[in-house]
Image (spheres, rainbow, N blue to C red):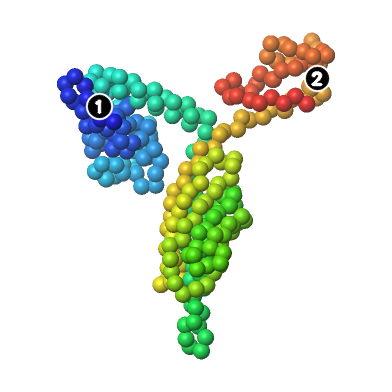
Amino acid sequence: METTNGNNIKADNFNCIVCLKLIVEPVALPCSHSFCKTCMENVLKQPRRICPLCRSDVSFLNAEDLRPNAMLKELLTIVFKDEYAERVAEIEEERRLASTFNTVRKRIHIGNEHSQVIEGGKLINHKWTLFVTMSDEHINDQQDQSKDYISHIDVNLHPTFEPNFVTLRKAPFCLHRSGWGTFLVQVGVHFKPSLNHNPMTLTHHLNFSAAKDQSTHVVVFEIPKEKPTLVVDLDEIPTPTPNNVIDVDDDVFIDDRPHAVMSDFDDDEDYEILIS
């Protein structure tokens, strides 16, 4: 939404070109262009690191090298005080969520392979295979990872096929058919419930002019981080004696045995404690 201050200065004029929102915690690149700090940190994680505005090379920069634009920050906090405060709160919430979730980015590929059916030197049909696969976003290894992420796939074919609606429930997600004509295939990709991701609708127009044709899309999963589990076996913990002192939190004992977590674990880490 377009907002202005009392001097009719539009906040949109100070939007970050990456997130398209008011710049917050601005940092300046050597080319003098400024962006949100978190946006530039994400840019620097990409294989090709360039300024999002002028495309100048910034591959020599790391996140810790980003230079705060103090003058722009002071201007924004004065001219757009309320909007800037809202953006700061938004960023802090994003960072809080990032601390409890792992962001996993994958590539999802949809396409078809094709071969001609020749008899007596004449083309009599086309065989084709529709496929959906997954791989890492920035790694060239194309090993299919769909079995780890996809639960099933719904394929809508041309009405002349019988059946024209097919569900694939097991990787590799491939559908083999034959026919003369090409058409637009609509595919619904359903992910495993544990990933808590909405289904994706993809389309692919069959291509009989090449042996293989595909398009690639990016899918992002926010997977909750699991707390590390510490299993404490009370039977294996010796009873404290003057010659055998065990440092435990709060000196809690049950049946003369320590019922606590040993103090040499990381104090900054949250643990799920299982007592056996």
| Coordinates of residue 220 in the picture (x, y in percent) | 47, 43
Please indicate, yes or no, whether residue 121 appears anywhere in the rendered image: yes
Looking at the image, is 267 positioned above or below residue 211? above
Looking at the image, is 214 positioned above or below residue 273? below
> Which residue is denoted by mark 1 in the rendering?
3
Q: Amino acid at mark 2?
A: Pro
| Coordinates of residue 94 in the picture (x, y in percent) | 44, 29
> In the image, what residue occupies the spot 44% across and 48% down?
218
> In the image, what residue occupies the spot 58% across and 57% down?
167
Mark 2 Cα within 10 Å, few/some/many (few <14, many 20+)? few
| Coordinates of residue 39 in the picture (x, y in percent) | 35, 35
Q: Is residue 197 left or right of residue 7?
A: right
In the image, farthest residue toward the left: 7
Name the quadrant of the N terminus: top left
Q: Amino acid at mark 1?
A: Thr
Q: Is residue 16 left or right of residue 274?
A: left
> In the image, what residue occupies the spot 29% across and 42% down?
52
Which circle marks residue 238 in the picture? 2
Mark 1 Cα within 10 Å, few/some/many (few <14, many 20+)? few
- Going from the N terminus, do you reach mark 2 or mark 1 first? 1
